[in-house]
Image: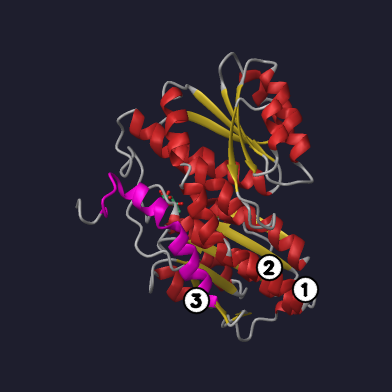
Amino acid sequence: QAAEKGGYEHFMMKEIHEQPKAVEDTLNSIIKDNQIVLDLEGLDISNLSQIHFVACGSAWHVSMACQYIFEDLTHIPVRVELASEFRYRNPLLSKKDLVIVISQSGETADSLAALRLAKEKGIPTLAIVNVLGSSIAREADYVLYTLAGPEISVATTKAYSAQLVLGYVLAIYFGKEKGLLEEEKVRYYLSELNTLPKKIERVLEDKERLQWFASKYSNAKDVFFIGRGIDYAISLEGSLKLKEISYIHSEAYAAGELKHGAISLIEDGTLLIGVCTQSQLYEKTISNMVECKSRGAYLMAVAPYGYYQIEDTANFTTYIPRIDEHFIGSLAVIPLQLLAYYLSVSKGLDVDKPRNLAKSVTVE
Ligand code: G6P
């Protein structure tokens, strides 16, 4: 097994480092000569009335991020659904809708059942899957593969990142097909996306700082993640990673929602992590962070290089490279994965096989 871990102590760390490649391979599989190449023949993209993303766990968090990006680039209304809810609530679907199921394994029972339900109702289905020939890949009308390679660690990292970039490219493609994005804009987005692998590498270079930070917080009882828009979607994933492998209770909140409940849990020393990457929203999130600081919270921020004034508020900041803001979540999530990893290691836990969790949940 040591050889399979490629010199890393755990599969999770190996897979965290495989993210630049997973992203690059996935992008290269659908972008050729600066053109998006997707086989979606027969899908009437221009007339779609609604897109329903259906998934579980981290794939649901990818869907949450996709919601913001799709609505912005395609002007198609998006709903994001937990597969376990969708399958039992008799969802209202129209023939002009599209159901997109995202799944690493392609075998998650609830996601598969949701896909079958959509098919029974005659709604077109598209699957974003990592495992070749899996049930969801076989049964969906259209399949797009993430090229993350086999993922061993229960806590997903590289499959999540590959799903995100596939979502971005799909949104750009739909926007183009609908006539909303000019050639030049498409080229700009694709050239930004091509910078992602190198920029992820750049974030990984700072891992020791997060290791140091994690060593101070291994006794944390509660951790809160906040953000707005795409930053909220990334907060959800950061919080899930943390609770999955470090067993520290954590919650992710849309920053503006804190005041409706969770702020009562903030006390002296509570760690609050603000994801602040969206220029239109980040002042708002910072003001929520200030409210928590005045109640005793210790603040960590994730922000792009150049947003240095954040240090007036945050006690610890981790910077990420700049990129078009639709795609910056792919960079913001990396420090959160590293933080969860190092907290788990510093508590001496089984990083790759956390208690009570399975890599793929094939029963209900
Ligand atoms: C399990 C895994 C998660 C994963 C979820 C959905 O809970 O531990 O990491 O996000 O299932 O799995 P899928 O294979 O459908 O992406």
Q: Amino acid at mark 2?
A: Tyr
293 to the left or right of 107? right
**Which numbered disc, 3 or 2, marks the residue closer to the eye?**
2
Specify whether residue 112 is in view.
no
| Label 1 packing within 10 angstroms: few (<14), some (14-19), many (20+) | some
Q: Label 2 near label 1: C-beta < 8 Å?
A: yes
Disc 1 versus disc 3: distance between alpha carbons? 21 Å
Q: Nearer the viewer, residue 76 or 189?
A: 189
Decide if residue 106 is on the left or right side of residue 198: left
In the rendered structure, which segment of residues is drawn in magenta?
5-30
- Please name the residue that numbered disc 1 is placed on: 181
How many marks on residues?
3
Q: Residues within 10 Å of mark 2 (few under 14, many from 20)?
A: some
Q: Amino acid at mark 1?
A: Leu
Name the kind of residue labelled 3 in the image: Ser
Depicted 124 relative to depicted 215: above or below: below
Mark 2 residue's CB less than 8 Å from ligand 1 = no
Residue 169 locus on image (x, y percent): 62, 69
Q: Nearer the viewer, mark 1 or mark 2?
A: 2
Q: Give the residue number, with chain letter if any, for mark 3.
A: 29
Tell me the element at label 1.
loop
Q: Which residue is mark 2?
A: 189
Tell me if mark 3 has few (under 14), some (14-19) or many (20+) residues whose alpha carbon lies within 10 angstroms of its own. some
Q: Where residue 247 sits: x, y (%)?
A: 41, 31
Q: Of the two numbered discs 1 and 2 on the same chain, state the one appearing first in sequence.
A: 1
* Mark 3–mark 2 distance (CA, rounded to whole Å): 16 Å
